[in-house]
Image: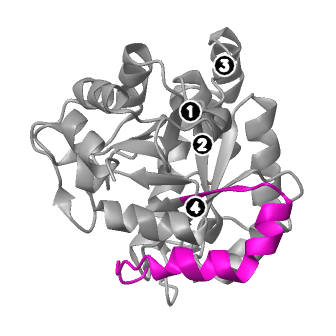
Amino acid sequence: MQIRRRNPNPQVNTGEVIYKSKIPNTEPQHILEEIVWYKETEVDRMRDRLPLQKLRQQVADVPPAKDFLAALRQGKTNPALIAEVKKASPSKGVIREDFNPVAIAQAYERGGASCLSVLTDKKFFQGSFDNLSLVRKSVDLPLLCKEFIIYPYQIFFARAKGADAVLLIAAILNDRDLNYFVKITKSLGMTPLIEVHTLAELDRVLAIDDVELIGINNRNLEDFSVSLQTTQDLLQARREKLIARDILIVSESGLHTPEDLNTVTKAGAKAVLIGESLVKQDAIEQAVSELFSV
């Protein structure tokens, strides 16, 4: 899928009044493109409130990042669990009304999660960087900032708020930016989790030399359908390359039962990222234990 970047309508001066001309195809074609376009304006506002120079100073003052990849390799469960602190999504709406990010994170930690993922997008997922900071103060696990990153500024901001890893989505980043963002992330001592949805995206990511962690999203971002076959197909197609480079694979989305975990584990995934099916449970700690009991 192709994600266009926002192209503002140019101003036209008629001599008396300035107005914006209408350009064809200036509406987002799907939800992912809508999110990316919104992020462009959102990050502009963030820069106005906190310039990059001051943000870098904040980053220099935070404790060193925890080793996200090592925590997955040492997994407390099989496969290792990245449990997601998630209130809502564009496709499902509010998942948990009584959303308490700290209580959820602590329940995940007690249940045996190796790492946590915290949604920070406010407009579409009802998350926040405040939630990331609160969770950082309440648990010792490595944290992934689950955000739609399109600028280096967001990587620095995530580190300042306590993130140990960031999500880089191949579908919204060109090859140059992917390479650059991986380098920036690692220079801050963080782990990049690069997410792919298709074989073409996986091949693009495999062209990057120092990739160590790849997420395969089983959700089709155009129609929101979910199939674990995505993990199976991509791993079957590139199994030898992934093994040779010792790249750890995370299967994401559509994981609800022990049988689902068995399916992606047999395919070659060493970790899973699970949000909705756990966060909506009344007893989250017990739900984690039961999911990984088989």
Among numbered discs 1 and 4, the one appearing first in the sequence: 1
Residue indicated by mark 4: 269
Where is mark 1, residue-wise? 158
Inspect this view and state whether residue 17 appears.
no
N-terminal of the two: label 2 or label 4? 2
Residue 4: x, y in percent? 59, 76
Magenta residues span: 222-250
Eyeballing the image, is 227 above or below 278? below
Say whether disc 2 or disc 3 marks the residue closer to the N-terminus.
Answer: 3
Identify which residue is drawn at 37% across, 67% down.
Answer: 260
Q: Mark 3 points at which residue?
A: 59
17 relative position to 280: left or right: right
Amino acid type at circle 2 is Val
Q: For mark 1, does the 10 Å Cα neighbourhood hold few (<14), some (14 to 19), or many (20 or more) residues?
A: many
Q: Is residue 63 above or below residue 152?
A: above
Residue 166, numbered label: 2
Could you tell me the amino acid type at mark 3? Val
Question: In the figure, residue 207 lies in which quadrant?
Answer: bottom right
Camera-side residue of 225 and 33 = 225
Of tags 2 and 4, the one toward the viewer is 4
| Residue 231 left/right relative to 218 | right
Residues at marks 2 and 4 touching, judged by CB atoms closer than 8 Å: no
